[in-house]
Amino acid sequence: MAAADFVFKVIVVGDSGVGKTNLLLRYTQSEFDLNHASTLGVELSRVEQHIDGDHVMVDFWDTAGQERFKSLNKVYFRGAHGVILVYDITNKHSFEQLKSWYKVAKDNGCDPVKCVYMMIGNKNDLEDLRAVDSSEGVVFARTINANFFETSALSSDNVENAMNDLIEEIHRQNKSGLSMQNEDTVQLKEGREIKSKSGCCSKE
Ligand code: GTP
Ligand code: MG
């Protein structure tokens, strides 16, 4: 594997069924799976990008939204550079739960000073079933200082925009030294070999 200038760790959390796995499938493999099984534990996938001349690798940690895995998820936040909080725009409860997902992330190693937060309202192809106004999303995102996108893993709408925005922000913060307290942000001479999904794309 080619040497990377930066390796970033991004954790994806949110209630079961909001579309975390499909958002990553869409972004990393341009795929969508209507019948994808619920994630058990955690699944890793990687994307590579070139940003401002740097070779950047991003390891996405796709966590399980089911309640029984909630305590397990806590250990994953250590050393993370970014957190994606996902809800389903047709499911008000999944939106209300973001407060608690945010707290879990914050209390377990993702201090907002070190970690970049992104909020995603997924399934915006289901406009007729919408239960959460965009304005509600905007207001909450503002309170946690996160950028906010409404997306559809099904139609691809905004998925690239949201993910690229997060990666660029993490890269920018690391370059400017805002996250220097995070020991995992050192420049790597060699890329780490970790489990990655096949077909992962290089986005140059
Ligand atoms: P857990 O792994 O249990 O935490 O769930 P998850 O958040 O990973 O959800 P997953 O990606 O497995 O998607 C759950 C269901 O929602 C599946 O049936 C998907 O096909 C569907 N789904 C995901 N994203 C979208 C979307 O953007 N639009 C629509 N209409 N359905 C979606
Ligand atoms: Mg999943």
Image: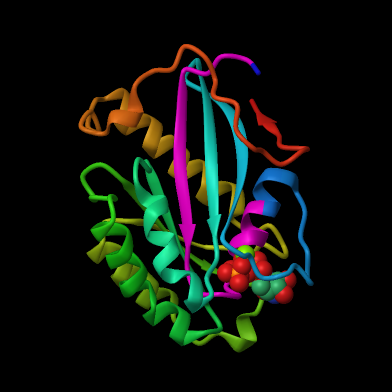
Q: What range is drawn magenta here? A: 2-24
The N terminus appears in which quarter of the rendering? top right
Q: From this viewpoint, is residue 203 visible?
A: yes
Identify the residue at image location x=61%, y=88%. Answer: 129
Residue 26: x, y in percent? 69, 53
Residue 23 part of the magenta segment: yes
Side of 122 where 5 appears, left or right: left
Nearer to me, 203 or 197: 197
Side of 101 where 84 appears, left or right: right
Q: Is residue 81 above or below residue 38?
A: above
Residue 202 part of the magenta segment: no
Identify the residue at image location x=57%, y=73%. Answer: 18
Residue 177: x, y in percent? 24, 25
Residue 62: x, y in percent? 56, 55
Residue 140: which quarter of the image? Answer: bottom left
Side of 107 where 91 appears, left or right: right
Identify the residue at image location x=53%, y=50%. Answer: 61
Q: How many marks?
A: 0
Nearer to me, 105 or 204: 105
Identify the residue at image location x=35%, y=68%. Answer: 138
Nearer to me, 3 or 175: 3
Residue 96: x, y in percent? 37, 81
- Which quarter holds ligand 2? bottom right
Q: From this viewpoint, is residue 19 visible?
A: no
